[in-house]
Amino acid sequence: MNELSGPGRPANPSVQAAVVASDLGLTFPGKRAGEEVRVLKRIDIDVRPGEFVCLVGPSGCGKTTLLNLLAGFQKASRGEVLVQGEPVHGPDRRRIYIFQEGGVFPWLTVGENVAFGLRRKTEMERQRIVQHYVDMVGLTGFERVYPRQLSGGMRQRVELARALAADPAILYMDEPFGALDYFTRFKMRADLVRIWQQERKTILFVTHDIDEAVQLADRIVVLSPRPASVQAMVAVDLPRPRDANLPAYLHTRDRILGIMGMDLWSDKATRSDDASTNEGHQRQGSLTHSLAERSGPGHTETQG
Amino acid sequence: MSTPDALAVPPSSAGRQSGGRGPGDAAPSRPLSLSYGAVLLPLVVGAVFLLIWDLAVRLSGSTLFPKPFDVALGIIELVEQGLLFKYVVASLFRVTWGFTLAVLVGVPFGLLLGWFRRVQEAFNPMIQALRPISPIAWIPLAILWFGVSDAAPVFLIFLASVFPIAVSTMAAVQGVQMVHLRAAQNFGLTQFQLFRWVIVPATLPQIVTGLRIALGIAWLVVVAAEMIAVNSGLGYLIIDARNAGKRYDLVVAGMTLIGVIGWLLDLLMRQVERFPAVRWAYGARHE
Ligand SMILES: Nc1ncnc2c1ncn2[C@@H]1O[C@H](COP(=O)(O)OP(=O)(O)OP(=O)(O)O)[C@@H](O)[C@H]1O
Ligand SMILES: [Mg+2]
């Protein structure tokens, strides 16, 4: 699958890029002339099949808007999106969008939600697929329960199962864990990585949490503030599950923080009002330390 | 790596999981509170009310105003004359027709109003101008058009309930969340499927609530219409008992019947709210 080209075999769709955005721009028209909001300046992205790409960027920079364009919920003012070689003109069941919150249908049970994209299957097939994905996301036994009876994390699991059941090639996820508490997010990430490794979907995942991006992604696309353009692409070449204590992990994280202009300790540390951090290097050490503490034992090794 | 069952499960859901029961089985504490709070207390209040009523009539020495016992006798008299059954059926018949027509017109019309912005823009001003006209004000026109027949009250009931139904249905459709529409579109639904599988189920609870309110209005209106436009029904009973011999015991008997039947109609509509397709929206009690 990875050979670049065979003789006389051009454009094999499985080798083709899963998602290509070229010169994508979007300006919202304002109420009056001169009031238009330019959200996306120029976006070029190229996602390989099966790749896990995280999009990070400051709040309000246009991440959701970009994902909406890629999914076909919204039209670009400029440029084009190709999914598996075809231009995107609207939403499509081969690429499913998972919303930050509230995307699950409250009038359907968990099982009915997961079956939503399976109307064309036979009853037997449908039941088998529903059970498979309900089990996969860890909701076995909750099939007849309504979403309001679930926790926020469980509802996101329902939405993930509903998306997977439709067997799309691509998943768009817009801060799907953004409304969850720290521990639940932690679990959800681990489970998402497991499921992605099983299912081999292409995933475009928006987050403002850089730790989340480094945990999940093969590649991180860093967007600039509005109007957004791609500021950097950072490949994360670390084995999974990822140890948040490894220097390589921390290095990647700090690099992205640096790109986003949040490396406070390296140039503005003297401004700090924290007595124990007068020096940039020391500050970095304490931050590393606190991160390691959250992630469990063995943090002392990261000090070196 | 991670086991899928180590979920952030709320403690209360453990029981649900094992039982595999329907999603909204009654909370266990209800039967107990039903016997005391829901039956005994209202009976006490009702008894006190009747007692005060009886005493007040006796103390005032009124000969026209009936005591509770006179009203009970009046109801028995109506039963014996065969009027009670006839009038109740007459009133219910008109409400059934008027309300059914209003549902058949109001719900589809409300769906159109909510779904197509142009339709809403075109019709909303007219609806808002027609809505404040009391159905009572339409009585002369109803008699002019339909004469003294069942059609007149049916028309009035239709008028009185069709607007609340249409407006609440419209509001329900407009309230359907964008995220649900998009999620559904994402699975490749056609416009018709979107309507069938998203708009209808999403709006059903609010539509049912609208119907409940509209049925209450319909019951109010049938009585008013029957007082003027026809020669039968509970409204006619009241006005007839007053005009033909100042039989206030029968007047109050008629009022009592109207109240009780209206209450039963509302209970009936509340049963509709217990269907799973409607109940999902009233979840708070279970949590
Ligand atoms: N329909 C619209 N009309 C005009 N401006 C809009 C519209 N939708 C979004 N915007 C603007 O576009 C910008 C980007 O919005 P978007 O929701 O894509 O940001 P985001 O990166 O997802 O933010 P967050 O991190 O807070 O989720 C915002 O400044 C917003 O005000
Ligand atoms: Mg967003």
Image: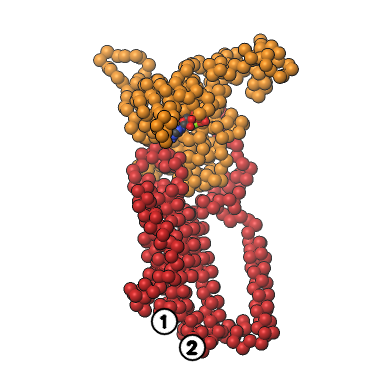
Q: Amino acid at mark 2?
A: Ala
Between B177 and A249, the residue placed more toward the observer is: B177
On the picture, is B254 further left or further right than A76? right
| Secondary structure category for the residue under label 2 | loop
Q: Residue at x 67, y 16 (%)?
A: A271
Letter of the chain shown orange in the rendering: A
Q: Secondary structure at mark 1?
A: loop
Q: Is residue A222 left or right of residue B195?
A: right
Q: Mark 2 sits on what residue?
A: B244
In the rendered structure, the colour chosen for chain B is red
- Dividing the image into 4 quarters, which one contains the C terminus of chain A? top right
In screen coordinates, is A302 left or right of B152?
right
Nearer-N-terminus badge (1/2): 1
Q: Which mark is residue B231?
A: 1
Report if residue B283 is visible in the image: yes
Classify 10 Å Cα crowding around label 1: few (below 14), some (14-19), many (20 and above). Answer: some
Question: Residue at the location (70% across, 15% down)?
Answer: A277
Name the residue rendered at 43%, 48% in the picture: B174
Q: Residue furthest left?
A: A8
Q: Position of residue A95 (x, y in %)?
A: 39, 32
Residue A20 visible at all? no
Q: Nearer the viewer, mark 1 or mark 2?
A: 2
